[in-house]
Amino acid sequence: MMKKIQDQDLERIIGQLLRYGVLLSSLVVLAGGIVYLIRHGGQLPQFGVFRGEPDKMKNPVPMWKAIVNGEGRPLIQFGLLILIATPIARIVFSIFGYLMEKDYLYTLITCIVLAVILWNL
Amino acid sequence: MTILVFSGLLFAGALAAGLLGSLTGLGGGVVLIPLLTLLFKVDIHYAIGASLVSVIATSSGAAAAYVREGISNIRLGMFLEVATTAGAVGGAFLAVYLSTSVIAIVFGIVLIVSAVSSFVKQGDNLLTGPGSRLTRLLKLNGSYPTPQGRQSYTVKNVVGGFLMMNVAGVLSGLLGIGSGALKVLAMDNIMRTPFKVSTTTSNFMIGVTAAASAGIYLKRGYIDPGLSMPVMLGVLVGAFAGSRILTKAKVSTLKKVFAIVILLLAVEMIYNGVNHKL
C-alpha cells in the first residue's frame, strides 16, 4: 500500500508544478507584453516575411542583458522560456520521484525522454 | 494597422480559438495556424512557433487538473512520450527541409483527420484482465475514478500504440500542433484505453511533446515574442474560460459547426499550399 500513496503524492506535486509554471510564465509574458506595447505599440507589425530572431531572443545570456536594459520583447521571450521549461521540469521531477519509489524501469524511461529533449537543445 | 491594434486583434482571435478548442475538445492549436496565416498573413514559421508555445500553455494548464484528480495514466504517458518526443524532434528537423507549401498541405490533411475523427462515435473501451506480458512489465494497466470507486483497466497493442504516437510526435514537431486527435486515436482505437483516460493522458503528453520541438524552434529563431505574446495569452484565457463553462454548455451542435469550420480551413490551407500562396 505504501507505493500507492507515493504515486499519488507524485501526481499531486506534478499537478502543482505544471500549474505554477504556467502561471509564472504568463505573468512574465504579460509584463513583457505591456513594456513591448508601450515601447512599440505605435509601430507597424512585420510578421509577413520570415527573417528569424536576433541573438537576444534565442540565447539566455544576451536575453538577460536586454531584459536588464528594460526591453519588453526579451522579457516576453524569457516568459516563453519558463513555459517551455515547465514540462521539462516535470520530467526531471519524475525521475527523482521514480527513483524514490525504486521503480528503476521508469527512472530509465523518464531519463530517455529527458535525454531526447536535451540532446537537441 | 499598428502593433497595438494588431496585438489586440490577435488576442481576440486566439481567445476565440482557445474557447472553441476547449469546448469542443479539439484543441485550440488546430485553428490557430490557419487563423494566423490565412487571416493575419503571418509567415507560417512564426505561426508554428506561436502555436507551439500556446499548446504547451493550455495542455499544461489542463493537465494540472487531470493529474491531480488521478485520471491520467502517468506511466502510460511517460512511456509513450519516448515515442512522441523522438518524433517531435524529427518533425522539427524535417520542417527545415520541407517547403512551406508542403507543410501547408500536410497541415490541411491533418485538419481533415481531426475534424472527421471528432464525428466518429467513441465507444467506451473497458478491457479488464491481466493484460499481456509487456503491459505488465511496463505497468501500463491502471485505474481511474468513477462515482462507484476506482475502475481498473487493461491496455493492449503497446507496440502499435507506440508507433502511432511516433507519427503523432512527428506531426506535432512539423506543424506546431498538439496532435491531440491523433494521440487520442492511438490510445482509444489501438491501445483500447477508456476514453476519459485517453483524453487526459494525451493532454498530459502534449506539453512535453511540444516542449521537445519548441526548444529547437526557439533556438532557430522561429518563436517571435511580439506575435507569441497575444496569441499565448489569448488561447490560455479562452481555454480556461472554456473549461469553466464546459459543464453547463451543450456542445454537440457547437462541435459540428467547429468541425465544419476546420474542414473549410483545411481546404483553404491545401488550396494555398498547392498554389504556393503561403
Image (spheres, rainbow, N blue to C red):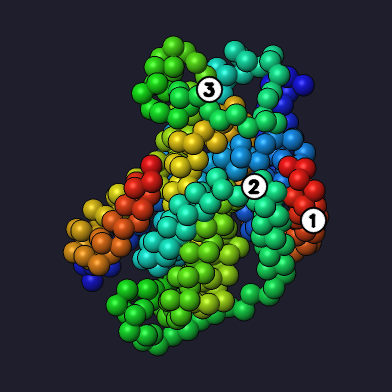
Residue under label 2, please give it.
Answer: B99
Q: In this view, does B20 lie to the left or right of B190?
A: right
**In front here: B217 or B248?**
B217
Query: Disc 1 marks which amino acid?
Result: Val
Residue under label 3, please give it.
Answer: A73
**In front here: B143 or A48?**
A48
Other-residue count near label 1 (Cα within 10 Å), few / some / many at <14 / 14–19 / ≥20: some
Q: Which of marks 3 and 1 is in front?
A: 1
Q: Can residue B210 be seen in this view?
A: no
Q: In this view, does A66 lie to the left or right of B21?
A: left
Give the image location of residue B65, x and y in percent: 47, 53
- Labels 2 and 1: the sequence-earlier one: 2
Q: Residue placed farthest to the bottom in the image?
A: B129
Placement of B103 over or under B197, stated as above or below: above
Query: Disc 3 marks which amino acid?
Result: Arg
Q: From mark 3 to mark 1, how far is it between C-alphas? A: 35 Å
Other-residue count near label 3 (Cα within 10 Å), few / some / many at <14 / 14–19 / ≥20: many
Q: In the rendering, which numbered label is found on residue B267?
A: 1
Other-residue count near label 2 (Cα within 10 Å), few / some / many at <14 / 14–19 / ≥20: few
| Quadrant of the image containing the N terminus of chain A | bottom left
Look at 58% across and 34% down and name the residue there. Answer: B228
Placement of B136 over or under A116, stated as above or below: below
